[in-house]
Amino acid sequence: MGSVIPLKKSANSAYLDLKNLVNNRLIEVEKLIEVKLDSKVSLIKKMSDYHLKSGGKRLRALLTLGSAKLAGYDQKGTRDVNLSACVELIHSATLLHDDVIDESDLRRGIKTSNALWGNQSSILVGDYLLSRCFEIMVDDGDLEVLKLLSSTSSKIAQGEVKQLEYKGEADLLEETYIDIINLKTAALFSAATKTGACLAGSNEKEKNALESYGKNIGLAFQIADDALDYYSKEIIFGKKIGKDFYEGKVTLPLIIIFQRADSEERNFLIETFKKTERTKKDFEKTLELIKKYKAVEDSLQRAEYFVNVSHDALGIFEDCNEKKILQNLTGFSLNRSF
């Protein structure tokens, strides 16, 4: 098994600093989400409550609130609360759909909604969350934000479909992988941070800077998450080691070992991912290759590049507490312990 990457307390501290910075607004976001997900259909209410209260960092909502504050949004009114809730609802809907696609029965160590209520209900409740999100956007009335968040929903769907299209292809190109995670993960991060700039009425340079900040955090976050599949401890992250592997998802650690492997090792990977099901023995042999070629360490090194790009994107803003907190947060994707 590959080396366990040490976790840094400072990264978790940066997350908590951001949460403390906007905590009063985040409380309002939680209240609004609860109101918006109220339904006379008891199963919708039950599933929505379960899903939204089963954990999660609210990172995308925090990024929307923090970016708006950095860009100078005066927090008069509730637009920041409304649109942060909207971003979080998009994320929650995609998680419900993802768990169905992946046939997952656990998320963060807790049973998934589809494991408890079935796939059909999970898909429909995910759709319900999206519909409520679009109601919020329409009520907000900002066409720029409406276009941004609606196109983001489209990108996420395209990313998920593209990932399915390449499922089981051990010779997946790194460029294709980056394109997939840019669509399915980074797009919502960048939309969250750019929404903050839109709320503040920022100029195009500031909007682009915050969009770049979010996009590159998202890329780093997904690469690090994919690397977790080969070294994480479920007790910390609530994620079973090898989950992506057994589902046939080819992520960056596998791409790296395929690039460096000899012909025999490449044939093993190709044949392994052609199978309908992969065995524990297959996984153990793959872990040996992961360790041999230092694929986890090098994946995190790739992610560190995006962390640095994200950090530097905020350089155009004046030095302030909000800027410092958001820049410190960039390392959270690599060194988080929750």
Image (cartoon, rainbow, N blue to C red):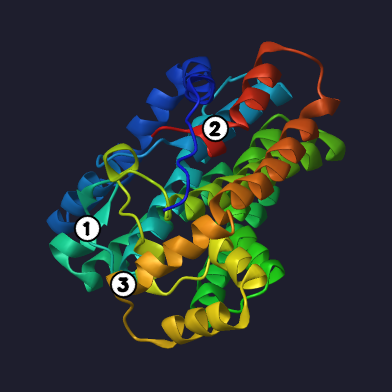
Q: Disc 2 marks which amino acid?
A: Phe
Inspect this view and state whether residue 142 appears. no
Crowdedness near tag 2: few (<14), some (14–19) or many (≥20) residues, C-alpha within 10 Å: many
Q: Residue under circle 1? A: 113
Rendering coords of residue 133 (x, y %): 45, 51
At mark 1, the secondary structure is helix
In the image, taking residue 149 as reference, residue 160 lies left or right, namely: left
User: Who is closer to the viewer here, 224 or 81?
Assistant: 224
Verify CB contact (< 8 Å) between mark 1 and mark 3. Answer: no
Q: Give the spatial CA distance, label 3 vs label 2.
A: 33 Å
Instruction: Tell me if residue 113 comes above or below residue 327 in the rendering.
Output: below
Rendering coords of residue 320 (x, y %): 73, 12
Image mark for residue 281: 3
Rendering coords of residue 284 (x, y %): 36, 65
In the image, taking residue 148 as reference, residue 24 lies left or right, namely: left
Q: Disc 1 marks which amino acid?
A: Ser
Q: Residue under circle 2? A: 332
User: Who is closer to the viewer here, 98 or 152?
Assistant: 98
In the image, taking residue 47 as reference, residue 244 lies left or right, namely: right
Q: Disc 3 marks which amino acid?
A: Lys
- For the point 47% across and 15% down, the residue is 20
Q: Give the spatial CA distance, label 2 vs label 1.
A: 27 Å
Q: Earlier in the sequence, mark 3 or mark 2?
A: 3
Q: Earlier in the sequence, mark 1 or mark 3?
A: 1
Inspect this view and state whether residue 163 appears. yes
Crowdedness near tag 3: few (<14), some (14–19) or many (≥20) residues, C-alpha within 10 Å: few
At mark 2, the secondary structure is helix
